[in-house]
Image (cartoon, helix red, strand yellow):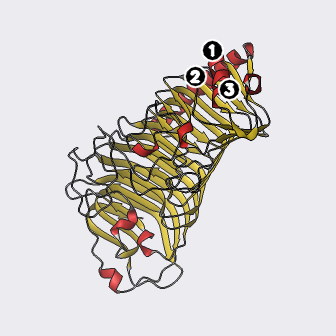
Amino acid sequence: MNKYLQIISISFIALFSACKSDSVKQEAQPAIFDITTYGAIGDEKTVNTAAIQKAIDECTAGGVVYVPAGNYVTGTLWLKSDIELRIAKDAKLLGSTDINDYSRDNQGSIEAPAFDECLIYAENAKNITITGGGTIDGRGTKDNFPIGKRKAYNDRPMLMRFVDCIGLNFNNITLRDAASWCVHLVNSEDIVVSKVHIDSRVNRNNDGFDLDGCKNILIEDSEIHTGDDAICPKSTVRATENLVVRNCIVSSHTSAFKCGTSSHGGFKNIHIYDCEFRDVGMGAIKLQIVDGGIMENITIENIKIVNSEGPIFIRLGNRGRGYTKAIEQIYKKDAESEGVPVGSIKNIIIRNIDAEVVSEKRDRWGILITGIPGHYVENVLLENIKISYPGGGAELEAKNVVAEDEARYPEQYFFGVLPSWGAYIRHAKNIEFNNVVMSTRAADARQEIVQDDVINFVRK
């Protein structure tokens, strides 16, 4: 086992021990705060924000805030330390469809300033558990929360946001239909996600887990089906590090696993394994540094990719954003760098991948690994990889010139149809393909691999 993976394992042994201790402590103090005792009515009509919040507020010494069978409409709820929010199997917390029922006093999102509102919120809290087998449904359809032309597409609440928290446990819970991002965790640590089912793809920007500046995270045994990025580490301020994702089934219209879009703080020590990525638009695996951060020690292995538009995208760019203020994304060509020095990507292992690329959009196809002039993606091993592509590329496409677009928003299809059908590698150093078998199901006039400014490419 790699040294950094040993460090992660040790961290999680400590984390699980802490969770076990917390469980024992809660069993010793089994106070139950039933929300119906405080006036909550599960009729799918009554807005119960005040009643549920009162139950939370009275759970001052720790205990269980219990949601029994029923459909309870609510606006923003503020969770506190040492609380278990237990939603019974036949119970639902339903997000209000009135934007005025959502708080604006909580911390918002720097990267997505329009989505400041959220259904469940906590800040500077410790030891929060959400469990019970029930459902949290944001009811965030386009009819309930229409997409506007600006203010980054108008007010659409996230399902959850936790800021500066320690000890978060999401277990045996279903999360549905956020109006924007589903779970946004910011500068938080010691996070366990187990047996969570996310189905959120009824609006735009329907991310699953956005992990911004977090550390010591385990996501396991979960199903995540989203409209936008399913598992998306971010780093607007500080690094996201010590992340393990295992035994998960993931689907998305945009990407299954994506490091970016904000990348100022960087990403370290990430291990993704034993997962299935299915029905993925744009790209299954995306690793990106464009805002000056450092990405290193990433291992992704034992992944089955079924029905994806693209397999692997690794991008070192120069958008140069410092995230000192709220921003809007810039998608245009020839964008200008915002001034933060270029970061780095190195020590990446992707292995034991079986991928089927199925799409008519050839600008999604192919492994794309690219830095920018003078700044190389370094030390990348692709090993034991099998990828089947549709084929059908034309001779004219073999002459395509791939723009640098150093400061543009990092998305593979912005580069256009590649001059290769299998892999395009540019501004890269020490790249090894070991038992990488790529094939097309129809003839393709382009080359299998095209290199540009590559130092030490090895294929075995």
Work out whether 51 lies above or below 392: above
- In terms of secondary structure, where does tag 3 sit? helix
- Image quarter hosting the C terminus: bottom left
Q: Which residue is mark 2?
A: 80
Q: Determine contact: label 1, label 3, CB under 8 Å.
A: no
Work out whether 419 lies above or below 405: below
Q: CA distance from mark 1 to mark 3?
A: 16 Å
Residue 3: x and y in percent read 45, 36
Label 3: few (<14), some or many (≥20) within 10 Å? some
Under mark 3, the amino acid is Ala
Q: Which residue is mark 1?
A: 60
- In terms of secondary structure, where does tag 1 sit? loop
Q: Which residue is mark 3?
A: 51
Under mark 1, the amino acid is Thr
Work out whether 38 lies above or below 400: above
Of the pair 414 and 202, the residue shown nearer to us: 202
Residue depicted at x 71% and y 23%: 64
Q: CA distance from mark 2 to mark 1?
A: 8 Å
Q: Is residue 175 visible?
A: yes
Of the pair 139 and 213, the residue shown nearer to us: 139
Residue 189: x and y in percent read 49, 29
Horizontally, residue 56 falls left or right of residue 10, namely right
Under mark 2, the amino acid is Lys
